[in-house]
Image (spheres, helix red, strand yellow):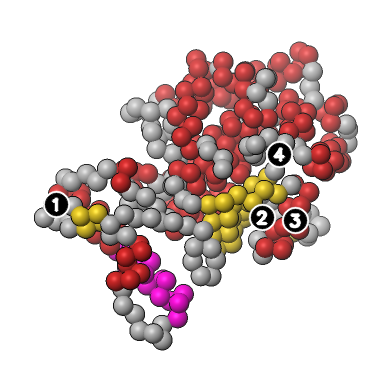
Amino acid sequence: MHKMRVLEHPLLSIWISRFALEHLVSLPPQVEQHEKQMLIDEYFKAFARNVRREVHSSKLIVPRANYRMAVTKIIFLDILTVLPVPTSPNTWKVRLTLNYKELTYGTKWVETTDIESVCKSLGIPPTSMLPDGTPKYTLPALIDNTFTPPAVLSDSNPIIEYLERTYTDPDSSRAVCPPASRALHAIFEYHVTQSITAQLLPVMVMHMYDKKTPRDRIHFRQRTEAAFGKKLEDIELKGKDREEHWNKIERAFDLLATSMRARSGAGELFTGSNLSLADCTLGGLLLALRYDSPDEAWMKVSSWSNGKWIRYMAALSKWTAVE
């Protein structure tokens, strides 16, 4: 909740709360509730813009510690595992964003086997269509009951873009995915997907299998073996082939580390110390590797790029809470 705060400054008299706005804005009784909410939202955004202009023009700095997002009523759908944490890179992308924005949310854990039925029952849209025209349902998904009507979304990037639009930080430097950077983020995601994510199954398949619930292991085995035409155990590389494949993945990580060294400024993340969509993508992948395979994948990754990924994960750790 935004705290009402009096500032002794000639240009800025009060840091007003959203709760206070709802009581200060007087609207005729015939205005519908959703229209009232929209007007309040616009008023609040206008107020925030004025505050930013006044703070900027007067050189006054309002400490980040004093800013809090409004209390929200968000349900976040994530994939259940045998661990107390998720192992999906895509759900981690959204969880990192929610934590970074300090939004109040609860997690609804769903087994992969139940994703379609749960999404249909909650009115969550499919993320794509299968070749035969059947809707495909995946997680993450999010239901925001903060407003009326609630927002119901699926797929990580649309969810993050919604959170950016709806819960915009007054400090523009903290934007996770500024509109002007979305094309670059799309290129980055394509690179990570092609050079790292798409290469992981031959060395990660049994690690992934082991972390799934008993029901989901059956589903994962059936689906993966049907796609590859062989047993899971035969998909997994062994011996020299396995090491060469890990070396190929290491080179992709080294390229990322080299690119990150080229930027100016302090901080281990892509834009320094603030979270970006690129960090959500790469951080989600690293978290999945750490939890799916702490004794192989994470041991290897943590030894690469002169310890870059240990430092990177330490910087990311403040937003990795799972409640």
Q: Is residue 168 visible?
A: no
- Do the CB atoms of the residues marked 3 and 4 lie less than 8 Å apart? no
- Label 2 or label 4, whichever comes before in sequence order: 4
Q: Which residue is mark 4?
A: 81
Q: Which residue is mark 1?
A: 8
What distance separates the C-alpha of mark 2 from that of mark 3? Answer: 11 Å
Residue furthest to the right in view is 230
Element type at marker 3? helix
Q: Marks 1 and 3: which is nearer the front?
A: 1
Element type at marker 2? loop
The relative height of residue 297 versus residue 123 in the rendered view (above or below) is above
* Image spot of residue 260 (x, y percent): 44, 27
Residue 298 picture quarter: top right
Name which residue type carries label 1: Glu
Q: How would you classify the magenta stretch by its main secondary structure?
A: helix
Name which residue type carries label 3: Glu
Q: Which residue is mark 2?
A: 127
Magenta residues (range):
32-46
- Label 2 or label 3, whichever comes before in sequence order: 3
- Do the CB atoms of the residues marked 4 and 1 lie less than 8 Å apart? no
Q: Is residue 132 visible?
A: yes
Element type at marker 4? loop
Q: Which residue is mark 3?
A: 116
Q: Marks 3 and 4: which is nearer the front?
A: 4
How packed mark 3 is, by other alpha carbons closer than 10 Å (few <14, some 14-19, many 20 or more), is some
What distance separates the C-alpha of mark 2 from that of mark 1? Answer: 50 Å
What distance separates the C-alpha of mark 1 from that of mark 3? Answer: 54 Å
